[in-house]
Amino acid sequence: MVNWNGFFARTFELDTLVTTLSGGNGAGKSTTMAAFIAALIPDLSLLHFRNTTEAGSQSGSRDKGLYGKLQRGHCYSMIEVDTSQGERVWFGVHLEQVANRDNKVNLTSFSVQGIKPEHTPTALLLHRLDDGRGQVRSLGELKAAAQQDGLRFTRFSTVSEYHNFLFDTGVTPRKLKDQRDRVKFYRLIEASLYGGISSTISRSLKDYLLPENAGIRKAFNDMEAAIFENRRTLEAIRETQRQRDQFRQLITETTHYVAADYVRNSAEKKRLSEQALAARKALAEERRILAEEKNRLIYLADELEHLGARERMLGEELDIASEHLARVLNGVKLNEKITGYQQELDELEAKLAIQEETLAELQDEHAEATATKVAAEEEVDSLKSQLADYQQALDTQQTRAIQYRQARQALGEAKVRCGLPELSPEQAKAQEQ
């Protein structure tokens, strides 16, 4: 049952013979039976459920019927059976309220086959959300989930197809071919729903299983009465035979008991005497063994104490030896480090001697370079003085060259002005005087 009034997701185990529902008013007995009947007879023309009082009598009014026993949304009523071939089969109905004035219910029958041991009805009908709550699947989602798990999902379009499937799987004892057969089957279950007495249930069962034939029914009743009388006679004969066999066995057992009682008592006395002697010997042996074990225990206790003292002494010696070994190992490591440092020191002294020789050579070279630098600086100063003299002489020569060019130019102009092409400077100087 999924999403019914009072039950969101509830599973009931049905006995192979009789299953009884008990509880107070409002506990959900009628709702449970309504779900069971809806799964067996998905015919809305028959599913009318009456109110009942605490005594079981019918009240004058009707409730909302199947509509009033459902919650909003998708609802399911499903039954699981094991067929004679050892196959698990789920069959049931999907119900959904239709909100209108007539309080209608949409009802669709289906079946699921190919079920494996790890499959459960609740896991198929409910979709688990992220917050841990369950959401009821719609019929389409149920079909998709079943196919995803490798199950065979079948949706029936008519009630007859659904009941043919139930007959083939062995759920119903006979085929429900038409509305009349379904009414008989419903009346049979309805008698249990509203607390009918055994005679009513028997009458409903006969009406359902036997055809409407007075002769067959009378023959069946006569046969039932004859079988009952035969059963009573057979039980009386069996009881008489049982009492006769019991009396015969009692006499035989009494004779054997009286005959064997003396022999048994004498043999029992001899056996008990032998057991007492053997027990006395065993007790003495056990006491001797116990004394030996006590002495052995005292010896072992002393040995244990001695071994404990020796163990403590050896532990102390081990600690001292470990400390001495650690010191020796530390000294060996320090000696190795000193040897390494000495070798490094010798190498550094050799390198230092080489560096000192190199430094002396470099100092000699530096002195020579300093003397060479001083001589070069003196030579540079001398060259600078000579260069200054050369520059002064050059300037004088350039001045004289300029003066010479100016004199030549003036001489040319004088030749032109005087009309003396052969005029020389000496002549010009003489004329000027």
Image (cartoon, rainbow, N blue to C red):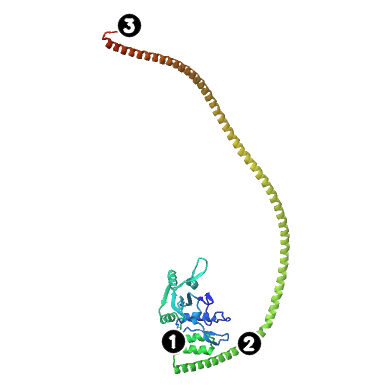
Given this view, does label 2 or label 3 mark the residue nearer the observer?
Answer: 3
Q: Are marks 3 and 1 in contact (CB under 8 Å)?
A: no
Q: For mark 1, does the 10 Å Cα neighbourhood hold few (<14), some (14 to 19), or many (20 or more) residues?
A: some
Q: Looking at the rendering, which quadrant does residue 168 occupy?
A: bottom left
Residue 79: x percent and y percent?
A: 48, 77
Residue nearest the viewer, comparing 27 with 81: 27
Report if residue 117 is visible in the image: no
The secondary structure type at the circle numbered 1 is helix
Residue 249: x percent and y percent?
A: 61, 87
Determine the residue positioned at 72% across, 68% down: 283
Q: CA distance from mark 3 to mark 1?
A: 177 Å
Asked if 345 appears above or below 28 in the picture, the reply is above
Checking the image for residue 432, the label placed there is: 3
- In the picture, measured across the screen, residue 293 lies left or right of residue 64, that is right
Asked if 380 appears above or below 44 in the picture, the reply is above
Checking the image for residue 181, the label placed there is: 1
Residue 25: x percent and y percent?
A: 57, 81
Mark 3 residue type: Glu
Residue nearest the viewer, comparing 38 with 224: 38
Dot 2 or dot 3, earlier in sequence: 2
Mark 1 residue type: Asp
- In the picture, measured across the screen, residue 135 lies left or right of residue 259, that is left
Determine the residue positioned at 41% across, 82% down: 160
Dot 2 or dot 1, earlier in sequence: 1
Q: CA distance from mark 2 to mark 1?
A: 59 Å
Asked if 205 appears above or below 81 in the picture, the reply is below
Determine the residue positioned at 53% across, 25% down: 359
What residue is pinned by disc 2? 250
Q: Are marks 2 and 1 in contact (CB under 8 Å)?
A: no
